[in-house]
Image: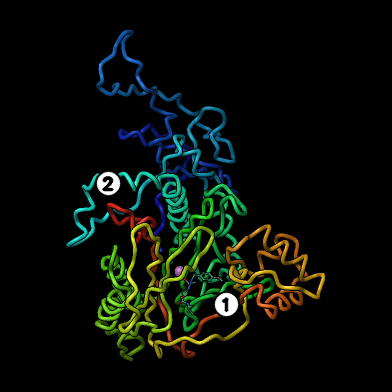
Amino acid sequence: MGAESVNVDGANVADNVDGAVAGIAAVDLNGSAKTEIVDGVGSGSEDEEDAGEAGDNSSEPKKKKKKKRSKKKKSGAAPSNGAGGAGGPAVQTEPPTVGLSRFFLDKVYPEGEICEYKDENNFRTTNEEKRYLDRMNYDALNDLRKAAEAHRKVREYARKYIKPGLTMIEIAETIENASRALSEGDGLEAGVGFPTGLSLNHVAAHYTPNGGDKTVLQYDDVMKVDFGVHVNGRIIDSAFTVAFDPKYDRLLEAVKDATNTGIREAGIDVRLCDIGAAIQEVMESYEVEIDGKSFQVKSIRNLNGHNINQYQIHGSKSVPIVKGGDQTRMEEGETFAIETFGSTGKGYVRSDGECSHYARNADAGHVPLRLNKAKTLLHSIEKHFGTLPFCRRYLDRIGEDKHILALKNLVQAGVVEEYPPLVDIKGCKTAQFEHTIVLRPNVKEVVSRGDDF
Ligand code: 57R
Ligand code: CO
């Protein structure tokens, strides 16, 4: 996995020309300081608005005057939490621990990839009524963009950190801690959107380690890193696949191409079945050779993308990744997770293995519960997660460590739904790529797009 270039001698670095600032990041555990360019744009900390001359009432934006930064002492002494102390520029640490609002002091978060709609919907780009409608949803979109920026920064770090030899628990907790720190929350206000999926090889989805899981990542593994970040319930669901052996590169390329095809085809009034057909055509146009055996890559026909609502990861619409899906259309204002799964196996998954993923069943009304432990567990689930999916490790960390029997009771009562691992045939390899898109009234925004994928 690519490493970020860091300057390890802690030398001061001058501000660079475009307003981004370099700060001496936290001194890491073995004492060597890492210098990481952090984007000061929007931070305001380095540039001061030039008040211009008294009485200056020109409408021209004031020329920005650069305030000379006082050179940091050679020792590179910097606040260990990277928060930059009073007034100084914020610097990010590795792993990320400083919240995004320290880098976007105006609380305006970067937009994703903007795509114009095609054909009969192209008018929307400039239509005043659609642009007005778009402005109505600014706060929700800005929350989603903050979650997306956090997701990008988490996966940027994760790509450097994830190596064979780490346990699945170390990987999951590193991703979850960074997600909470960057989004600045640990519950319903912001934080982890759903359990960190780390499904390996023939397991396509819904695996995250439970407490005590000793599984160690291997060089030959193909791991789907599917994690969510939310801000006020606006969830980013985005995933990528990690493989260390280059023999899997073409499999990953096939799935990335299929996902980008789904993103390109998506749009207002587009039929879900047409997206599925386009995805399958691209996916199955790839032939891969692994260990001397050749495979036509298969779309996993019973896995789908899905629409996302506030605090609800899986809405009422599923986006098929094969042809023959339903003719329901995408609609203005909807948010979708466009995800595809490619497999060298059957291209079909079934539930198997120990369950880790759960979610409160939003449709279940009041159900009488016999077990008192079940009642208190349900109350704790509602308080900490609401309708966000959770896993057993998250119950452990909120102090509900003796939850097995009570959780089983809630599942049997239909109050909580379980989502066991979804597996293709043993020995095969599956890969996944996923982005979250918003069908804004005037443009389609791929909110979670990054320079990685
Ligand atoms: O993206 C309970 C979760 N999601 C976590 C995430 O697609 C999700 O079609 C759902 O924890 C629940 C799919 N599944 C069918 C069997 C219905 C899966 C693909 C993986 C995943 C995790 C997903 C799916 N559906 N919703 C989000
Ligand atoms: Co998803």
Nearest the eye: 164 or 285: 285
Q: Which element type, helix, strand or loop, lies under badge 1?
A: strand
**Residue at the image position 70 percent from the left and 78 percent from the top:** 413
Q: Residue at the spot x=58%, y=45% of the render?
A: 31
Q: CA distance from mark 2 to mark 1?
A: 42 Å
Q: Nearer the viewer, mark 2 or mark 1?
A: 2
Whether 234 is drawn above or below 356: the answer is above
- Res 440 quadrant in image: bottom left
* Quadrant of the image occupied by residue 337: bottom left
Residue 449 visible in the displayed image: no
Inspect this view and state whether residue 313 appears.
Answer: yes
* Residue drawn where x is 57% and y is 66% of the image: 195
Measured as percent of width and height from the top left, residue 438 is found at 36, 58
Q: Position of residue 157 (x, y in %)?
A: 47, 56
Residue identified by numbered label 1: 419
For label 2, the crowd category at 10 Å Cα-Cα, with few meaning under 14, some 14 to 19 and many 20 or more, is few
Q: Amino acid at mark 1?
A: Tyr
Q: Secondary structure at mark 2?
A: helix
Residue identifier under label 2: 129
Label 1: how many Cα within 10 Å (few below 14, some 14–19, many 20+): some
